[in-house]
Image (cartoon, rainbow, N blue to C red):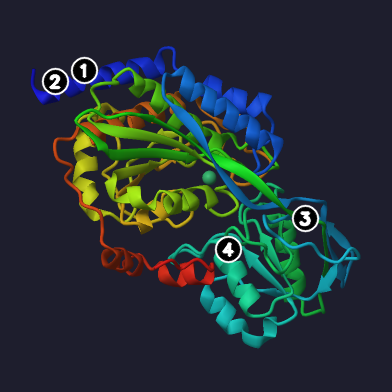
Amino acid sequence: MSQENARKGVWRKIYGDAFVGGEAYRNLAYLCDSIGNRFAGTPGDGAARAFVLRKFQDYGLPAREEPLSFLAWQRGTASGAVVEPTNYTFQTISLGYSAATPTEGLVGEPVFLDYGHPRDFEAAGEHLRGKIAFVMEGSAPGDRFVHRSEKTGLAIERGAAAYLNMNNTPGGLPLTGTCRFGQASPIPCAGITKENGEMLKRLLDSGLPVKVRLVLDNAFRESTSANVVAEIPGTDKADEIVVAGGHLDAWDIAQGALDNGSGAVAVLEAARLLSAFRGQLRRTVRFIAFGLEEIGLIGSTRYAEIHREELPLIKAMINLDIVGVPVRFNAEGFDTLVPFLDELRAGLPELELEPASAGLGLHSDHLPFALAGIPCITLPSRQPNTGGLATYHNYIDTLDKVSRRSLCEASALVACALYALATYDSFPVKQKTPEEVKETLVKHDCVEALKAEGRFPV
Ligand SMILES: [Zn+2]
């Protein structure tokens, strides 16, 4: 039998197993409806890890927790209001790692900085000192992506007293999300809705003096969490490793069904699907449910530190963060990986995947691996069940938004990709040298962002 026909047999079995009797949705329903929120350091975080560990073991994979200690953040109450030239209360939410305000609140003058591109902060100059940086979520069309934590970094640098993040999608929902990577923010940072942000912009445009009061009650404490790690040992190339990972933790205000219950159960389901091929996988396939992603990629960053000596053996890493119906593979800044991904795509024409892309994202668990020079793959997806609502980092990221079919599709495709990566004769792509990693960061315009976020690594 030709290799191509043998592969087709494998793909057929994987897709059949995923769609008939697949467990991804059932596992996600358990995480969402039976465990409660999986925020870092909460009881739900621990219960979710125990569930995932047991599932890996049920699928016949040796599995373990690798403990992590970290600075946990605890959300308290949050309120915000315009107090001049009128009185109007805003729906307000603290950003992760935000400082608390004094109990009586912090009153300040908002300074509008558009989307918070570095040039907007530069234009504000000294004017921001002691005031409230007021910024829209997202980036202006045509600009590079500017993450919230880059904007807060710039606000802190310029002496702002607080940071106010306005959602950029309508619907009356404020967004949360971390404002610093794995460390306490020295200033209070909060989110408000698009609608309230628009009102604030109008007041500022009116030329009257405007003041906002923020009352945020947050706390910090030392805590522990863990990465959950399982593997299928390889055969003749067992010392070479292929990794599939996705974060298990989620924000405290919702079920984290899409972000990232979907990715975590897809990792688990890929493990179940591939367990049927034990003894045929030449390389070792390692599955990781990362902890502590939302508050600053802590689980994956620590994993890469603790396993530093093993990193040269990792041939590729697939990171799943918010999966749905796969649209294409993305080779996170790794152009030489694209032909491999397109060959995989050509073998599964019914999926109608777009050609692979190679953009580099800085805000999920592949980053520590990509910075170590490892070829990383992500799976840009579409979500058929959200009804057009923006679920990202707010209250409505719930199980009803998840398409069962999309979980089957994503899990099966990841299992096929892992199978291909684990059985390739000689792996066609080499790791990048530290010099090449630096060149990639420059090419993808990432240096300025990583510096402002306080995590420029190389
Ligand atoms: Zn995520």
Q: Amino acid at mark 2?
A: Asn
What amino acid does circle 3 point to?
A: Ala
Work out whether mark 4 precedes mark 3 in sequence or the reverse, and give the earlier one.
4
Residue 24 location (% of width, % of height): 48, 23
Residue 187's place in the image compared with 307, above or below, is: below
**Residue picked out by circle 4:** 149
**412 left or right of 84?**
left
Tell me if residue 211 can be seen: no
The total number of labels drawn is: 4
Q: Nearer the viewer, residue 457 or 156?
A: 457
Numbered label attached to residue 9: 1
Which is in the foreground here, disc 4 or disc 3?
Answer: 3
Residue under circle 2?
A: 5
- SS for dot 3: strand
* CA neighbours of label 4 inside 10 A, class few (<14), some (14 to 19), many (20+): many
Q: CA distance from mark 4 to mark 1?
A: 46 Å
From the image, tell me which residue sits under label 3.
Answer: 219
